[in-house]
Each structure stands twice: as structure tokens, then as C-alpha cells.
């Protein structure tokens, strides 16, 4: 049995060459045989499609044995049968190809999100390793893999990375990615029909890997949750790999049935934590390297400033970088991106981000100054008397650790102290706190006052 169109065509081309010799009549060949084709070859029967009912009669009556002789020689089969039929008749017998339903049409796997460009730091190393393990051996280890974190920390990037890795390494594996919004929309739509979503369930079940993003959106959606439970169970029992992302740990998900939350914890649950400044710095550099701007155009303190100022969310880094690139290429073109340029470009974002922090920074300065019997202006001023140094460093330490303000921003509030000076002061306090009991008590007292 020949399975592909190419195989059928190759065999028929060789047969026509021999049949033309056997018939030995160019007019008969050109009229009845030249435009024929091998429609199918199942078991020992060849079905030959010809152009008319007259061709069927002429070939069957006068040339059938010539075709059989050639077919036996080329296939090494002794019991070959030939059946001639009109091509139009054969077309009516062919079943139209069933059009498979298309779901999740807007949930596209983005090819530019890979493991290669996922920046790994202490905050996300475990999640990255788990995702890579799953991608290397889908369905073999932890099922499901449940990844949770605050928004904008790389969960969706890892889903795409898993999908792209599998597609590259094992193209036969079928991977389905969908957002929870799309899943909900599809369930709502199919439930309006009469098949209870059977086609949708079958559609998902054909995939080897199922990736679903932001499962927390299913909260309190009873019908969607029940439908997903059925899909999940079917995939899980078939050994298909499931990867789920959420903004919360499964135990913290509200509005979910216990049976669904417990399923989420059947495999491995990993967290992506808040990125540290160093990881954000590496992410920022990677994004600049992927942009049209040469990273050498940036002053180092600009990179550090953006990484620290917008470190709570990678999307914030994207927003800041895009705004800066737009400003320096379209609004105020420049070949050198200095701190002055960056502050000017990012001022709207900084103002929004700092609107709440300014009050808290001032509160820290006021409380520390009062605790040590100083005035706020003495703490933030340019003077460097010995009895000011410690409370000033404590202010820097508390503003950095409690508010996550950048070293540059802290320095700007303290008469323009530079990045390295503030960093050094914070490090001194951190080191002293390890052994200095008096300092530990002072910092704890100040924190209690600030929180009261």
C-alpha cells in the first residue's frame, strides 16, 4: 500500500513510460492514457482515474493486461488487479476532508520568547530549571507544573519557552497554549451548543502539552472550572503534560473547588520571586541589546538607575526603556544617554512611582532625626559632622530596604550624594547590624515608630 501522493505519482510516472511502449499506439495513448493518474493503490488493487467513460471501456477491453504486466514488473507483486474509473465519478466517492474546529485562535505562541533569552537570577532559577526539565521530558516528570508569581515577572515567557523548546526538539509533539481569558470565552461559546463542549474537549485532548496562563481568572466561574476539571483529568490520565501559571499559590486561590486546587498540587509548584536589582540589570541589558540602540550609548549609572527604580515589575522596566528610547530617538535625539537625559525622559514615570514614596522617605528622615536629636535638614544637608554620619546612613538603609528606592534617588534627596556613596553607607549599616546590638535595637525601635 502506498500512503503518500508523492509515492503514487512516482509509481504512475514509471508505469506510463512502460505502458506507452506496451500499447504502441500514440493516438490511443494520447487520447485515453496520457492524462490519467493513479488514484489509489490498496492491497493488490490499483484504481486508475481516466478522463471519460469511453476511456474506461477502451482500456478495460483492450489494454488491461498491458497495465497489469507493467504493474507486476514494477511492484514485484504477482496478483495485481487494475480498475479503471472516470475521474469525475471518483471525486463524488471521495469524502470531503473534515474541517477541524479551531479554538483559541488568539492564543499565539510567540517564537521570540525562549530559554536562551530568559534572564536567570536567584529570583527565578528554580522556575526556569523546572520549566526546562518539563520541556525536555514532557509528561515524564512533574505533572502539572504550577508556576506562580506577581504579574509581570516572566511566567508567560516561560510558557512560551517551553512551547518553543518542544517544537524545536520534538516537532511531532503537539503543544497548545491558551490564556485563561480565551479558555473562558471558548467554554461560554460551546456551552451554547448542544454537544456539552465535547468537540472542544476532544480538540484539547489531541495535544501532548497543554499550557494555560493566569488560571486565577477562573475564580468563581463554576461552569468553566468544572469544564476545565474534565479537560484536566482527561489530559492527566492520558499522560499529557500540563503547565499552569497563576498569580497565587494554589492554596491561596479563592473561588476554586477543593478538588481543582488539589489537582494543581499533584505535581510541582514553583514560585518566581521579586527580582533583585542585579537580575533586573541583566534583564535591562538584554532588552537594550535586542533594541536598535547600542548599549555603549548608555552611561552605567543610567542602567543601574532604571534597574533599581523599576525593579518591582519587568513590565515597568519595559515601559521605562521604551519611553527612554522613544525620547532619545524621536523627541530629543542624542547619541549619549546620560543620567540627566534619563531623568528628563522618565520624569512622568518617576513622579507617578514616587508620589507615595516621597511622603514615606520624609517620614523616615523625620523619625530618624528625632530619634537622634537632630533636625531633618542636618540629616539631609551637605555637612559631615561625626554625629550625623550614623543617622544619615540609617536613613539610607531604611529608605532602601523599606521602600526599595534606588541609590541615585536616595542620593538626590540628600544634597546630591552619588550612587556609590549611598551604597557604601547602606552596606556599612548592613554589616554593623550583624554584630552591633546597640544598632540592632536602634533600628528596631525606629521601625516600630515608623509602623505605628
Image: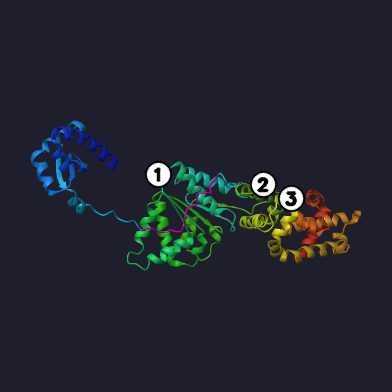
Q: Give the range drawn in magenta.
A: 101-115
| Crowd tier of the residue under label 1, counting other residues whose Cα lies within 10 Å: few below 14, some 14–19, many 20 or above | few
Is residue 140 at least partly visible in the picture?
no
Q: Which of marks 3 and 1 is in front?
A: 3
Residue 313 got which mark? none
Nearest the camera: 335 or 272?
Answer: 335
Disc 3 designates what residue? 301
**Residue 34: % across, % down:** 19, 41
Extreme residue toward the front, this view: 27
Q: Whole-percent x and y of residue 183?
A: 44, 61
Q: In the image, 130: left or right of 449? A: left
| Mark 3 touches mark 2? (CB < 8 Å) | no
Q: Is the magenta stretch mostly helix, strand or loop?
A: loop
Q: Which of 379 and 286 is in front in this view?
A: 286
Residue on which the image places disc 1: 172
Q: Is mark 2 on a helix, strand or loop?
A: helix
Cα separation between marks 3 and 2: 13 Å
Separation (CA) of disc 1 from disc 2: 39 Å
Q: How many marks?
A: 3
Q: Residue drawn at (78%, 55%), measured in percent from left and top?
A: 397
Residue 369, horizontal then vertical, whole percent = 85, 62
Label 3, secondary structure: give it. helix
Of discs 1 and 2, which sits in the foreground?
2
Q: Which mark is residue 295?
A: 2
Amino acid at each position: 500500500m502506498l500512503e503518500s501522493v508523492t509515492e503514487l505519482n512516482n509509481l504512475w510516472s514509471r508505469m506510463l513510460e512502460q505502458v506507452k511502449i506496451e500499447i504502441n499506439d500514440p493516438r490511443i495513448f494520447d487520447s485515453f492514457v496520457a492524462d490519467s493518474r493513479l488514484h489509489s493503490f490498496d492491497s493488490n488493487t490499483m484504481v486508475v482515474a481516466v478522463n471519460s467513460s469511453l476511456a474506461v471501456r477502451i482500456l478495460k477491453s483492450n489494454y488491461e493486461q498491458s497495465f497489469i504486466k507493467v504493474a507486476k514488473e514494477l511492484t514485484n507483486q504477482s496478483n495485481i488487479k487494475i480498475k479503471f474509473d472516470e475521474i469525475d465519478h471518483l471525486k463524488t466517492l471521495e469524502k470531503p476532508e473534515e474541517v477541524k474546529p479551531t479554538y483559541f485562535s488568539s492564543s499565539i505562541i510567540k517564537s521570540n520568547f525562549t530559554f536562551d533569552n530568559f534572564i536567570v537570577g536567584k529570583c527565578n532559577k528554580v522556575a526556569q530549571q523546572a520549566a526546562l526539565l518539563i520541556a525536555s521530558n514532557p509528561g515524564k516528570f512533574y505533572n502539572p507544573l504550577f508556576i506562580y508569581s506577581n504579574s509581570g515577572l516572566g511566567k508567560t515567557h516561560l510558557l512560551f519557552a517551553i512551547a518553543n523548546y518542544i517544537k524545536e526538539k520534538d516537532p511531532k509533539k503537539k503543544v497548545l497554549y491558551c490564556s485563561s481569558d480565551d479558555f473562558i470565552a471558548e467554554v461560554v461559546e460551546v456551552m451554547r451548543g448542544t454537544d456539552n463542549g465535547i468537540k472542544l474537549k476532544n480538540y484539547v485532548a489531541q495535544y501532548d502539552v497543554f499550557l494555560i496562563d493566569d488560571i486565577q481568572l477562573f475564580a468563581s466561574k463554576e461552569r468553566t472550572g468544572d469544564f476545565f476539571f474534565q479537560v484536566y483529568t482527561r489530559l492527566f490520565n492520558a499522560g499529557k503534560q500540563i503547565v499552569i501559571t497563576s498569580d497565587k499559590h494554589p492554596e491561596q486561590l479563592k473561588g476554586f473547588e477543593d478538588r481543582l486546587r488539589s489537582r494543581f498540587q499533584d505535581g510541582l509548584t514553583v514560585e518566581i520571586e521579586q527580582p533583585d536589582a542585579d537580575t533586573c540589570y541583566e534583564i535591562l541589558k538584554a532588552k537594550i541589546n535586542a533594541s536598535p540602540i547600542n548599549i555603549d550609548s548608555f552611561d552605567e549609572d543610567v542602567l543601574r538607575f532604571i534597574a533599581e527604580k523599576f525593579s518591582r515589575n519587568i513590565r515597568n522596566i519595559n515601559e521605562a526603556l521604551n519611553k527612554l528610547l522613544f525620547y532619545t530617538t524621536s523627541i530629543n535625539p542624542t547619541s549619549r544617554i546620560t543620567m540627566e537625559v534619563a531623568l528628563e525622559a522618565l520624569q512622568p514615570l518617576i513622579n507617578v512611582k514616587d508620589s507615595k514614596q516621597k511622603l514615606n522617605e520624609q517620614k523616615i528622615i523625620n523619625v530618624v532625626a528625632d530619634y537622634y536629636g537632630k533636625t531633618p535638614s542636618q540629616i539631609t544637608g551637605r555637612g559631615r559632622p561625626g554625629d550625623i554620619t550614623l543617622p544619615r546612613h540609617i536613613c539610607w538603609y531604611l529608605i532602601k530596604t523599606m521602600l526599595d528606592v534606588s541609590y541615585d534617588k536616595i542620593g538626590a534627596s540628600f544634597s546630591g550624594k552619588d550612587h556609590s556613596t549611598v551604597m557604601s553607607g547602606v552596606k556599612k549599616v548592613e554589616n554593623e547590624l550583624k554584630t552591633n546590638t546597640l544598632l540592632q535595637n536602634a533600628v528596631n525601635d525606629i521601625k516600630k515608630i515608623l509602623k505605628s
